[in-house]
Image: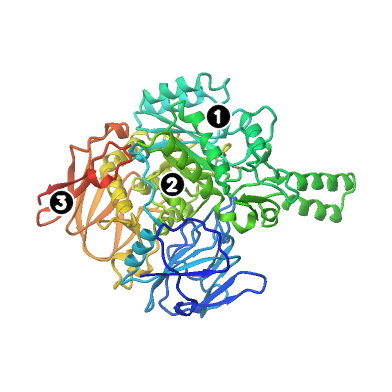
């Protein structure tokens, strides 16, 4: 049961696909609403003892969101920690448990603040700046509410099957030879791989839709050379377009008036990697179409996948602010002292990525000039939609890989996400696990974090432990920043251990892929908090470091340093499945609190009664995984079936056609 309420004159975000009649505000249950004098709406309700909050997608601090304040205002900030209230995305859906459980989606494209017992112990509130729609969703269980919400927002993006393979990335591969070296190293140590990512260094002067033809001569040939090795190159696309006369993308966009404007209707000039740049107006339909068409440059070279970055949008500086700052510096030139220090510092901090900067430019939507801050959270969503829409025109019969850093609910139909610039810390391994169910609730199924951590220096132990989680996450990408310790899978020695960990992913592929497709087709979550499946269980309610995958297995990776194992809470008797150098070993485990010993190169998960998990034979890439030759790990006493997705991995047909039931005997 869904009710829709309207506040003010909302911008149509197209987050929702179902047409729902508006309800009168008198029908709003669960929340009281009042207008905020400065504009916007405040929703409040009493906080009860057993109100646990789930959702908000990409956010810090655990599976249960109660006890903290979260801001939806997409932010480019690589310093991810629990003090933060916002990350790169705005996922304004939560479901609250307790006597009166319900779900709420705040389809407000400007800033929204969720205060779940941070300011008040006995009250929670949601503050929306600007106008929007509120959807209240009711159902018999948390799971039913989420499913209802998911069908409201439409089917999640399904990437090609090869996108479930292993991806190797690093900010710093500068040439075709660098990439060849990466692949050679994988081959030398017999490590499987499907994708190598190209970061901003592959471009000419960081110009979108260009390739440096000195370091990547004959790019299309190089793409083919890699493809002959079953490896796909996945280039990055940044939101900002370099200001440079003679650069086709800039000239054309300028001529067509497709860039965001300042107050006086001139192009709003900002700084990002290419230096002075402009922001394509993705909220303008024609501009979005035009930007989408630019992907043709890569598609014509044989590229089949992309990652969209810097689309919060990230802004290092605005040209005006930088110029002002530089003149302030001049004023204090040669005059040391606190006054100059304060002035210079404040100018530097105000250069970019601030709330104020998002009030300084405008979109052309229809006949209106809309200030960016009112629609801020949609920018990355509309960039990614622009690309996806073009892929459909380019080749309607093929699926492409696409994921984005910034996002809003609605974008889940067009692409996946990675969770931005995490770090090589144990806390971020746990955070990766904790975000999975909340992202799934908001429609994002094709998700993953930078394995091993983006910032800082990784270790062999952290990598291996992270890989024991990543074995199950749809997006499996090792990515790290420049100047950090190299963390490619072959950089730590222990090749046998790393090879084995990577191989398990390919052996698990029929399971990961089939469960993913089922989740997408059934508006289900791929990863669920334990309480979603065991609502009566008081312990399960509090579990913050385990998740259920599909309805069959429980995942509980080790996420602390030097651990010999960990405590695992099992809500019911389950079969422990241990993947290691001696193959697959199982043993029964009793429900309750178990201490489980797990070596860093082991993967352990727990299989529910009545369930089975398929395994394929080892393979060096997705294409070579044989879905017709599966063995099953079983926890059954009676015959059952397992449904495998047997499509060709690229078709845009409804995948229901390709779901094949396999009978499994005890
Ligand atoms: O300002 O392209 O999150 O994955 O390696 C940093 C360089 C820009 C941020 C992305 C990261 C990527 C990096 N980018």
Ligand 1 is found in the corner quadrant, namely top right
- Is the N terminus in the top left, top right, bottom left or bottom right quadrant? bottom left
Q: Which residue is mark 1?
A: 202
Q: CA distance from mark 1 to mark 2?
A: 25 Å
Residue depth check, mark 2 versus mark 3: number of the one nearer the observer: 2
The residue tagged with tag 2: helix, strand or loop? loop
Q: CA distance from mark 3 to mark 1?
A: 47 Å
In-front residue for pair 59/390: 390
Residue depth check, mark 1 versus mark 2: number of the one nearer the observer: 2
Q: Which residue is mark 2?
A: 414
Residue at x 46% of width, y 42% of height: 389
Which labelled disc corresponds to residue 284? none
Residue at x 41% of width, y 21% of height: 225
Which labelled disc corresponds to residue 641? 3
Q: Do the numbered discs 2 and 3 sit on residues whose CB atoms are within 8 Å?
A: no
Q: Position of residue 369 (x, y in %)?
A: 66, 53
Q: Is residue 294 above or below residue 226?
A: below
Is residue 531 visible to the viewer in this orientation of the structure? no
Q: Position of residue 520 (x, y in %)?
A: 33, 51
Q: Position of residue 310 (x, y in %)?
A: 58, 44
Is residue 60 visible to the viewer in this orientation of the structure? yes
In-front residue for pair 10/126: 10
- In primary-sequence order, the first of circles 3 and 1 is 1
Q: Ligand 1: does it lie within 8 Å of the C-beta at label 3?
A: no
Q: Is residue 518 above or below residue 5?
A: above
């Amino acid at each position: 049961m869904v009710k829709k309420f309207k506040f003010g004159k909302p911008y149509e975000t197209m987050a929702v696909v179902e047409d729902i009649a508006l309800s009168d505000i008198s029908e709003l249950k669960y929340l009281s609403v009042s207008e905020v004098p400065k504009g916007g709406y405040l929703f409040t309700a009493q906080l009860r003892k057993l109100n646990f909050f789930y959702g908000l997608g990409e956010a810090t601090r655990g599976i249960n969101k109660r006890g903290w304040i979260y801001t939806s205002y997409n932010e480019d900030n690589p310093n991810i920690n629990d003090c933060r209230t916002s990350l790169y995305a705005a996922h304004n859906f939560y479901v609250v448990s307790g006597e009166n459980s319900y779900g709420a989606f705040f389809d407000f494209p400007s800033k929204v603040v969720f205060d779940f017992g941070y300011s008040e112990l006995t009250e929670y509130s949601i503050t929306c700046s600007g106008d929007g729609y509120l959807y209240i969703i009711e159902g018999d269980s948390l799971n039913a509410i989420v499913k209802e919400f998911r069908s409201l927002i439409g089917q999640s993006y399904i990437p090609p099957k090869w996108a479930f393979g292993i991806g190797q990335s690093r900010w710093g591969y500068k040439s075709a030879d660098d990439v060849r070296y990466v692949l050679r190293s994988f081959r030398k140590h017999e490590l499987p791989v499907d994708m190598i990512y190209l970061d901003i260094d592959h471009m000419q002067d960081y110009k979108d839709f260009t390739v440096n033809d000195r370091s990547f001569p004959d790019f299309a040939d190089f793409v083919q050379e890699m493809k002959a090795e079953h490896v796909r190159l996945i280039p990055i696309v940044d939101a900002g377009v370099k200001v440079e006369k003679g650069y086709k993308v800039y000239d054309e966009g300028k001529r067509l008036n497709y860039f965001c404007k300042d107050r006086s209707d001139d192009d709003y000039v900002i700084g990002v990697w290419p230096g002075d740049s402009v922001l394509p107006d993705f909220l303008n339909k024609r501009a979005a179409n035009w930007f989408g068409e630019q992907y043709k440059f890569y598609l014509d070279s044989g590229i089949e996948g992309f990652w969209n970055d810097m689309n919060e949008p990230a802004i290092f500086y605005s040209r005006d602010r930088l110029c002002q700052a530089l003149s302030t510096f001049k004023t204090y030139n040669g005059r040391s002292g606190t006054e100059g220090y304060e002035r210079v510092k404040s100018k530097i901090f105000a250069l970019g990525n601030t709330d104020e900067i998002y009030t300084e430019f405008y979109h052309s939507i229809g006949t209106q000039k809309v200030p960016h801050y009112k629609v801020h959270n949609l920018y990355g969503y509309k960039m990614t939609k622009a690309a996806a829409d073009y892929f459909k025109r380019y080749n309607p019969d093929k699926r492409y890989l696409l994921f984005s850093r910034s996002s809003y609910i609605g974008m889940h139909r067009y692409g996946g996400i990675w969770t931005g610039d995490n770090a090589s810390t144990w806390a971020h391994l746990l955070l990766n696990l904790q975000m999975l169910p909340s992202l799934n609730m908001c429609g994002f199924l094709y998700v993953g974090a930078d394995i091993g951590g983006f910032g800082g220096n990784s270790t062999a132990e952290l990598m291996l432990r992270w890989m024991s989680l990543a074995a199950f996450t749809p997006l499996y990408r090792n990515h790290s920043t420049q100047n950090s310790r190299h963390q490619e899978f072959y950089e730590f020695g222990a090749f046998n251990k790393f090879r084995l960990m990577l191989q398990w992913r390919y052996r698990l592929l029929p399971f990961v892929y089939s469960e993913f497709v089922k989740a997408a087709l059934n508006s289900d979550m791929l990863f669920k908090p334990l309480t979603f499946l065991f609502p009566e269980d008081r312990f399960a309610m509090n579990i913050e470091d385990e998740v259920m995958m599909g309805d069959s297995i429980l995942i509980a990776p080790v996420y602390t340093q030097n651990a010999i194992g960990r405590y695992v809470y099992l809500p019911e008797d389950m079969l422990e499945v241990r993947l290691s150098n001696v193959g697959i070993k199982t043993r029964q485990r009793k429900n309750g609190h178990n201490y489980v010993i797990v070596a860093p190169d082991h993967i352990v998960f727990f299989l529910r009664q009545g369930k089975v998990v398929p395994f394929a034979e080892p393979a060096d890439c997705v294409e070579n995984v044989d879905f017709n030759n599966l063995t099953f790990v079983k926890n059954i006493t009676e015959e059952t079936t397992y449904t495998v997705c047997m499509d060709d991995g690229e078709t845009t047909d409804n995948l229901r056609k390709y779901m094949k039931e396999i009978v499994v005997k005890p």
